[in-house]
Amino acid sequence: MNKDSLKKSLALLLKIGVTAAALFFLYWQLDWPKLVELLGASRWAAFIPAFLLYMLSKVASAIRLNDYFRGIGLQISPIQNLKLYWLGMFYNFFLPGGIGGDGYKVFLLNKKRGASVKLLTGAVVLDRAIGVMALGLMLLALAPLLPLALPWRWAAWLVLPLGVFAGFWLLGWLWPKHMAGRTKGILLSLFVQVLQILSVAFVAYAFRYDDSQLSLAFVFMVSSVVSALPISIGGLGAREATFFLGAEWLALDPNKAVAIAFGFYLLNVFSSLAGLYYHIRKIDWNEPAKQIEK
């Protein structure tokens, strides 16, 4: 086994270990009879708008990424970009031991379009970084409104403008080619998060959640940061454990919180299955050339 294969194997083992540890923790902490009762009384029709909102958030995310591709001179059609984005989602969830969805996008665009691996990687990392930055800004904005008697919590609003300035400066310094697109990227990222918060609200309605919606949105955004880290299988376990601990901290119902987290995870899984189609039926990379000829 060469060094690269060993690193991938160790990374996969780490993800499996973290996922198993988080699920084991939840197994011993949850009230399973209450959870089963909760599932039986759920409003399953609410998952339809939740799913549609989540899919719309992924379309917005794909548009954001395609803007960064254009910033490095790579032109692919919006349809191709959506297909590639969903294919990447499928690989992230169902092939966690490989190069992952982001890595596959870089590989495929380098192979099919000859784009620089360095520039492609930079665009993909920027896409992730702006998403995390938007989450951080929203967390700062919501922190003082949480029903907690924390000292200095209002200081988050004072830090917020500094965070915006520091984030814009850092993005411009690390990715100067995308300076013109920073504002649009952050606005799109905020739009993505609002759509996903609304999606979670419908999942919460499905599970008859009646605690603070503001606290739920805050815990969800923290869990989004945690699940984005490459430490578990598709975020499974990490998101649910974050919801459980956040629910205890904010005095929410932990069983409903975990049910909401798992319900949102299922939205991720089912939406990612669309990428299986493009795994079987390859993307047509001649499409832009055909359009030009016409």
Image (spheres, helix red, strand yellow):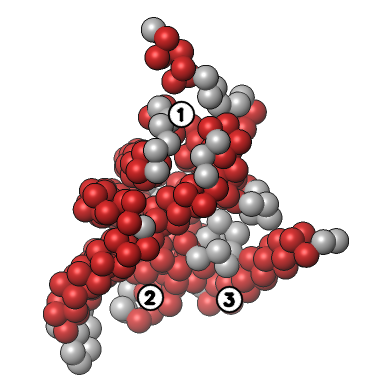
Q: In the figure, 82 relative to 176: above or below?
A: above
Q: Could you tell me how far apart the alpha carbons at marks 3 and 2 are, in whole angstroms?
A: 14 Å
Left or right placement of residue 122 versus residue 7 in this view: left
Q: Could you tell me how far apart the alpha carbons at marks 1 and 3 are, in whole angstroms?
A: 41 Å
Count of labels shown?
Answer: 3
Q: Which residue is mark 2?
A: 246
Residue type at mark 3?
Answer: Phe
Residue type at mark 1?
Answer: Gln
Q: Secondary structure at mark 1?
A: helix
* Dots 2, 1 in contact, CB < 8 A: no
Precedes in sequence: disc 1 or disc 3: 3
Residue 20 visible in the snapshot: no
* Residue 75 percent coordinates (x, y): 41, 32
* Dots 3, 2 in contact, CB < 8 A: no
Q: Which residue is mark 3?
A: 25
Q: Which residue is mark 1?
A: 80
Mark 1 surroundings within 10 Å by alpha-carbon count, few (fewer than 14), some (14 through 19), many (20 or more)? some
